[in-house]
């Protein structure tokens, strides 16, 4: 096994910049110089993206920026002891010890286990004190290797606090995966009853908690959170056992341990695997970093939940997605946004495939194919071609497949919105309500309302207390049946008609947009697409375009115009940054110039995130400049009637576009405007440099 850290990967007592991104940039250069990465851009972008999700500073003056990246050639640790310290988002102040963990996409489990072991060692005060006292890179390497490869004769538990990590690999533990699933079939009431009975049998027994920790990368925070909870539990006299669901794999907690626990803690940034094993347990949930920063607070909250009969509990009738347990302090608006984006994300494949096939049908058979497609498909074949020959036949087939795919747009949207609210029991009511919305002409607005309604009703029914003999039927029969009747009934009797009227009015308004009014809508969409480069505002504009795509037709091309506008504006920021790095290289760092080379392709493919490295380094100049160019592009595409039947792909789906020449012109003009704007801002909107003597002082 190759060395994870070498002396050339250690930097001691140097100033690596004023921000966390400056430090990550310098450490990325160190990794690249050691020959352990194939390129700077990919590794730096992945590390910054991970840092932006959750700050990696932890208590004790430590930071552990980390990522998985295809640019990494072998698992690597780059360490820096900073002077001065730099803020990495920890509550107790800046960090002077920074470990940059870079793992390849396909890192083997043995390497990942070593990386996680290092992360766990960093919460030990004697280890960090030794790192601060080390006099040379060789001393640092020796300390790290000592933590990673302790004496083989030492007891197995010497490296970590008892109970940290996963359950022991006993026969019971190794079978926990299968038995855990079986335990998960018990309902909330049944599990709660067993928990209460155990407490009543021995009210004086010590409190026991179980926890699951998981972070997106599964390397550092997952294991540090586990050890922090265990250490805090030991100090408080509470038994805490943690299941770490990290990149190195996970051994499920023994079902007997889960059954004995008074409450469960989910310290996670991703979904917990097989949550139904914890059905009926009082639960608290928070981001994984909170378990590192405030483990004692989380333990107190879990104990309070254990004594509260009204505390939130893990559901046994669903997969217990985050909508059930909820992130700590999550607002209703955040829950609603998550549900809507879930529906849109599941709907997009239907739109993508269907839209491209419809466009292909028009390309082969012309717009008149809409009138004859059904007849051609049913009455003709390769041996009996229709008037117009082979192209007409293939066009009809492509158009019909695409139209059938697009017919799932509203039901899929509603079904998966309901799924995000009530999990699997909400899917059938949601799809049914979406189908009713489509039947009544309520369109995607009806799908939104129907999905929310179906999910909410299914969730409420799932909270009913029912006899034991009926519990098994609830998720598969009772909930889908009743929720479908109520939600779809309300759509038919009350909501469908008014929403259909609103949809008709909206389509009429969009169809009538010309000139100044169309350009105004294009400006708004362009500003939204470039505001946060793939963030919530960008997603709202994109979801609006995709959701309306199914309403487009040869007679009503307004939805296709909106789709083209959103796609064109989203292409502007990466293309503009790429152009700017060519026009004035000295305004950009070497890393940014390298990012600019990749941004050409990313922009052409409508991947707005290609501009994120530039925006992250200089948001106050890059984002306004991007929005200016996006607004220009949006106005041009809407005003000139550019259309796109494809929801993604950029210039590579040119065959699905109408007036493709003007599409290209609009994107090019917007990119030039943004590029010139960002260069002007970098040249004239700069901070005044401090006098030399002040800097020296």
Image: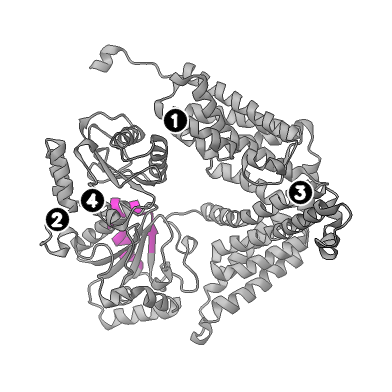
Q: Is residue 420 visible?
A: yes
Residue 694 in the figure: left or right of residue 499: left
For label 4, the crowd category at 10 Å Cα-Cα, with few meaning under 14, some 14 to 19 and many 20 or more, is many
Whole-angstrom CA distance, mark 3 to mark 1, is 40 Å
N-terminal label among 2 and 4: 4
Mark 3 or mark 1, which is nearer to you? 1
Mark 4 or mark 1, which is nearer to you? 1
Discs 3, 1 touching: Cβ within 8 Å: no
In the picture of the structure, the residue carrying the numbered disc 2 is 150
Q: Quadrant of residue 261?
A: bottom left
Residue 246 in the figure: left or right of residue 13: right
In the picture of the structure, the residue carrying the numbered disc 3 is 552
N-terminal label among 3 and 2: 2
Q: Secondary structure at mark 2?
A: loop
Residue 288, magenta (yes or no): yes
In the picture of the structure, the residue carrying the numbered disc 4 is 118
Q: Secondary structure at mark 1?
A: helix
Residue 649 in the figure: left or right of residue 59: right
Residue 481: percent from left, percent from top: 64, 76
Magenta residues (range): 284-305
In the picture of the structure, the residue carrying the numbered disc 1 is 594
């Amino acid at each position: 096994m190759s060395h994870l850290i070498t002396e050339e990967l250690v930097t001691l007592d140097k100033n690596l910049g004023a921000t966390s991104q400056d430090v990550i940039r310098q450490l990325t250069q160190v990794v690249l110089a050691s020959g352990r990465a194939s390129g700077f851009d990919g590794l730096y972008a992945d590390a910054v993206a991970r840092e932006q999700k959750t700050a990696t500073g932890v208590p004790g003056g430590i930071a552990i920026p980390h990522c998985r990246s295809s640019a990494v050639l072998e698992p690597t640790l780059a360490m820096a002891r900073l002077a001065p310290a730099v803020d990495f988002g920890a509550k107790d102040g800046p960090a002077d010890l920074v470990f940059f963990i870079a793992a390849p996409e396909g890192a083997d489990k043995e390497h990942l286990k070593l990386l996680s072991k290092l992360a766990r060692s960093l919460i030990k005060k004697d280890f960090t004190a030794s790192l601060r006292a080390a006099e040379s890179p060789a001393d640092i390497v020796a300390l790290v290797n000592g933590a990673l490869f302790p004496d083989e004769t030492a007891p197995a538990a010497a490296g970590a606090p008892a109970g940290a990590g996963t359950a022991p690999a006993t026969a019971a533990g190794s079978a926990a995966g299968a038995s855990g699933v079986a335990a998960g079939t018990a309902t909330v009431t049944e599990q709660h009853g067993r928990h209460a009975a155990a407490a009543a049998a021995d009210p004086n027994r010590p409190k026991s908690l179980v926890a699951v920790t998981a972070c997106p990368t599964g390397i550092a925070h997952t294991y540090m959170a586990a050890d922090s909870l265990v250490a805090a539990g030991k100090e408080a006299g509470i038994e805490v056992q943690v299941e770490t669901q990290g990149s190195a794999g996970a051994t499920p907690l023994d079902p007997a341990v889960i059954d004995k626990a008074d409450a469960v803690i989910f310290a996670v940034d991703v979904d917990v695997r097989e949550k139904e094993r914890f059905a009926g347990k009082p639960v608290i949930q928070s981001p994984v970093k909170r378990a590192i920063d405030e483990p004692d607070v989380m333990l107190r909250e879990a104990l309070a939940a254990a004594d509260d009969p009204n505390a939130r509990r893990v559901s046994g009738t669903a997969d217990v997605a985050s909508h059930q347990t909820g992130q700590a302090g999550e607002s209703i608006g955040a829950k609603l946004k998550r549900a809507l984006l879930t529906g849109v994300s599941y709907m997009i494949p239907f739109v993508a495939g269907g839209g491209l096939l419809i466009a292909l049908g028009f390309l082969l058979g012309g717009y008149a194919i809409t009138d004859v497609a059904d007849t051609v498909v049913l009455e003709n074949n390769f041996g009996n071609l229709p008037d117009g020959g082979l192209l007409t036949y293939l066009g009809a087939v492509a158009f019909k497949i695409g139209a059938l795919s697009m017919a799932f747009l509203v039901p899929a949207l509603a079904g998966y919105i309901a799924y995000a609210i009530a999990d699997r029991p909400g899917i059938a009511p949601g799809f049914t309500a979406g189908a009713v919305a489509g039947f009544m002409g309520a369109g995607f607005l009806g799908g939104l309302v129907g999905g929310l309604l179906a999910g909410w009703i299914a969730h409420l029914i799932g909270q009913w207390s029912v006899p034991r003999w009926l519990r098994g039927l609830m998720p598969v029969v009772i909930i889908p049946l009743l929720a479908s009747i109520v939600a779809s009934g309300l759509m038919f009797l009350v909501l469908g008609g008014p929403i259909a009227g609103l949809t008709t009015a909206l389509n009429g308004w969009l169809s009538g947009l010309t000139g100044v009014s169309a350009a105004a809508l294009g400006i708004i969409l362009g500003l939204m697409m470039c505001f946060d480069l793939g963030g919530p505002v960008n997603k709202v504009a994109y979801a609006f375009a995709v959701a309306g795509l199914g309403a487009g037709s040869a007679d009503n091309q307004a939805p296709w115009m909106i789709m083209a506008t959103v796609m064109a504006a989203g292409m502007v920021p990466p293309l503009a940054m790429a152009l700017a790095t060519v026009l004035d290289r000295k305004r950009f760092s070497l890393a940014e110039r390298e990012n600019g080379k990749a941004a050409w392709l990313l922009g052409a493919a409508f991947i707005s995130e290609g501009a994120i490295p530039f925006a992250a380094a200089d948001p106050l100049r890059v984002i306004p400049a991007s929005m200016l160019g996006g607004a220009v592009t949006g106005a041009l595409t809407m005003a000139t009637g550019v259309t796109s039947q494809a929801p993604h792909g950029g210039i590579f789906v040119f065959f699905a576009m109408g007036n493709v020449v003007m599409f290209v012109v609009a994107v090019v003009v917007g990119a030039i405007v943004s590029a010139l704007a960002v260069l002007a801002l970098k040249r004239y909107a700069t901070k005044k440099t401090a006098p030399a003597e002040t800097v020296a002082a």
